[in-house]
Image (spheres, coloured by chain):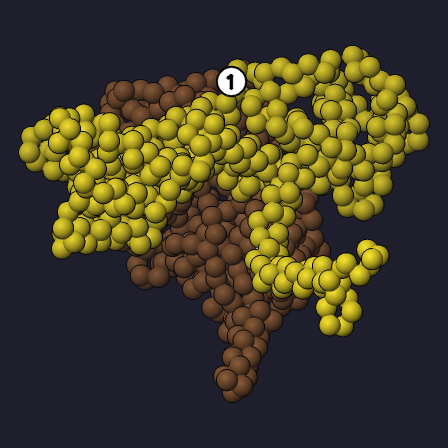
Amino acid sequence: MRKLSKLLLTLVFALSISSTSYAVTVASWGGAYTESQKLGYGDPTAKKLGIPINWVDYSGGLSEVKAQKAAGKITWDIMDVFAMDTINGCDEGLFVKFNFDKDFPAAPDGTKASKDFFTSMPSDCAVGNILYSWTYAYHDAKIGSKKPKTIKDFFDTKTWPGKRGVYKSAMHNLEMALAASGTKPGKGGKKIYKQLSKEKGLKKAMDKMEALCKDPNGGCVFWSAGAKPPELLMQGEVVMATGWNGRFFNAEVGEGAPLKQVWDAQGLDYQYMVVVKGGPNESDAMKAIAEMTSTEGLAGSAKYIAYAPWRKSSLKIIEAGEPWYKDGKTNMMTQMPTHPNNTKSYILIDALFWADNGTEIGEKWEAMKSGL
Amino acid sequence: MSSETQKILTTDGIPLEVSLKKVERRNKFKAFLLVAPLLFFLLIVYISPIFGMLFNSVDDRMVTNALPKTYIAMEKWDGKELPSEEVFEAFYIDFQKLMDEERDGKLSTQLNYTKNGFKSIIKKLRRKSKSFEEGNYKEQIMSVHERWADVEYWRAIQRRAPAYSYSKYLKGVDMYENEDGKFVQVEEDRRIYKKLWVRTLKIAFYVTLFCFLMAYPIAHLLATLPMKYSNLLMICVLLPFWTSLLVRTASWMILLQQQGVVNDFLVWIGFVADDKRLEMMYNETGTYIAMTQILLPFMVLPLYSVMKTISPSLVRAGKSLGGTPFITFWKVYFPLTIPGIGAGSLLVFILAIGYYITPELVGGASGTLISNQIAYHMKYTLDWSFASAMGLMLLVGVLAVYWVYNKLVGIDNIKLG
């Protein structure tokens, strides 16, 4: 009995060492996306720094990390979050504030980190990771001979009858609805947000979505996990579905599914990484995050998924190394949401607008949904 | 003889009564020690979280403590027009302090729950206030953003003045307290919670009813069939019970979707046309079907255990007294099963009212319940106090059901076996 308990003690001790005080734990969104992060910059970083990196899945939101903090045992070091969550998390004091140029390495040509990234960060706690896009896609074989081309076609249930897959929350749906009802996005979608912050514009967008979902020829299936839209399209549950471009790309190119994306009025959005304040391994986490978001690191993840790296210098590496995709024959630049072909009309998702108005619009959205 | 000598003494001279009491006390203490671990366990993991939740839902000290001077200055304000310079100055001083302590972000989150739009104007104020000059703070703050000149936003700040408030409970039924202290409903296009409460109760009620209708014959069969067959049947009931909830829900998704097994079969036998496949998922129907199947064992098992104890001779006696099969069933057998029905219904109803994962996966827009809203506020808006308030309202709802049941049927009538 004594021996056994000794053995158990050692085991527990060994486990606690290996799992907490040593590795850096990153919480991300799972599926093809986490895979691209792990292969693209996670494993190389771990090898270079000699710090093991664990990947865990979560489905977004700050509740888990807030609960971990409240319980006094934070288990995540780095999180991959939406722009809105970097704002809210920074306000709540959950994340470490960065000293940007000091904490992150410069580009190979010496450009400061803050200049190498496309735009400034929405909060002091955020470092840019990828740019992704909300697009919509259809099943090429099932859609018929006439193919959808514009954002208006998504709402055209006469030409393309059948259900639509849409995101379960209001975000991006309202922007899309306004763009489809004739509001010109303007530069980066500024006009859309101007409309949405007025009662009238918001109602217009809401009505447009309600009409689509109540349409007997249309109807909505709401999705929440990123892997769902390609799945819904392949099963034939919906004729068109909004989704994240990397997931569509992964289904189309990676798995050979007959899906096609429409880039008109795409919702361009940023994805960020943050370091959790008081995480189990904060100093190693800082080293790891700097390495992962370096020029090489960000370019690496684009080898596995069609999300654009944040750094301008990373794009240069990809361009020079085409075909960059892991199969060795697909050019990545044209698949990026930032490619000129895809940005003829786009909406830059306004994180501050959603941080401001998310709850009230969310209530209206849920009220609309519950009446369907 | 004096009264002293009347008392019976033990051998060491202590009155027997005292000695007995001592022993009894010791025994009681021992018994308490035996249950103590369980008691502490319940206190820690059951009672205290409930009180924590209750406290969380009314606790509003964060805002009160963040703006002490503002609230003192606001006491004289009637809430009709924009507040005076005094209030603005007090707010500015409070805000400076918050910025030094890096608590302004938390304040913006809290105020944003009361009225949307605070996040960005507080961020803007933080940037601009560094270059403020002394005096005339009203003008300076109002020039930061037009919303600072909107009296609605100052009323929203005022509403957060009390350290403890029940406003989250009002919000849970789509109401709020206006400036005059009256309870009014929120705008029509934002009313959502009442609708969800009603839907939750409705779905829980029907799921209980469906479970009852399906479980009663099964339980009867189980109780009356010979051991050989009833054991097999019992395994059929228990097997899904042992399977993970998620697996069962996912299986229903495969069965019910438009290109799923059930629809394929219906199309194959020609019951529905290929382009008019039935919608059985991502709506209320899906919630009903999946929840009924998942909760069925909770109805079958109590019914079965009660039916098992009913002697078959009672039914025979009823028949021999001239009752038709229906009359015997209705007058003799059914009343004897009521304790089982009560237990099963209560179990299923209480489980159904707080169900979360199944409606989330198969419910779509029309099949989601109040628990999904609670999860939404826990996860995405981070308004935990509101989530706590709704959780507590749900708990009170369950207790109310229990109370009504006790009044109607009597809780001692319940039997699980």
Where's residue A115, x and y in %? 64, 51
For image coordinates 40% across by 51% down, the residue present is: A306
Where's residue B29, x and y in %? 66, 61
- Label 1: state its secondary structure: helix
Closest to the observer: A288 or A101? A288
Name which quarter of the figure residue B121 lies in. top right
Where's residue A116, x and y in %? 60, 53
- Residue sticking out furthest to the left: B269
Q: Chain of mark 1?
A: B
Quadrant showing the C terminus of chain A: top left
Residue B102 appears left or right of B371: right
Task: Report crowding for label 1: few under 14, some 14 to 19, many 20 or more residues within 10 A (C-alpha).
Answer: few
Q: On screen, A81 above or below B131?
A: below
Closest to the observer: A124 or B323? B323
For image coordinates 76% across by 43% down, the residue present is: B103
Give, as a three-letter code, the residue at label 1. Asp
Q: Is residue B71 visible?
A: yes
- Residue sticking out furthest to the front: B1
For chain B, the rendered hue is: yellow
Residue at the spot of label 1: B189
- Residue sticking out furthest to the right: B135
Residue B301 appears left or right of A13: left
Image chain in brown: A
Closest to the observer: B322 or A323? B322
Residue B94 appears left or right of B323: right
Q: Is residue A236 visible?
A: no
Name which quarter of the figure residue B266 lies in. top left
Where's residue B218, x and y in %? 21, 41
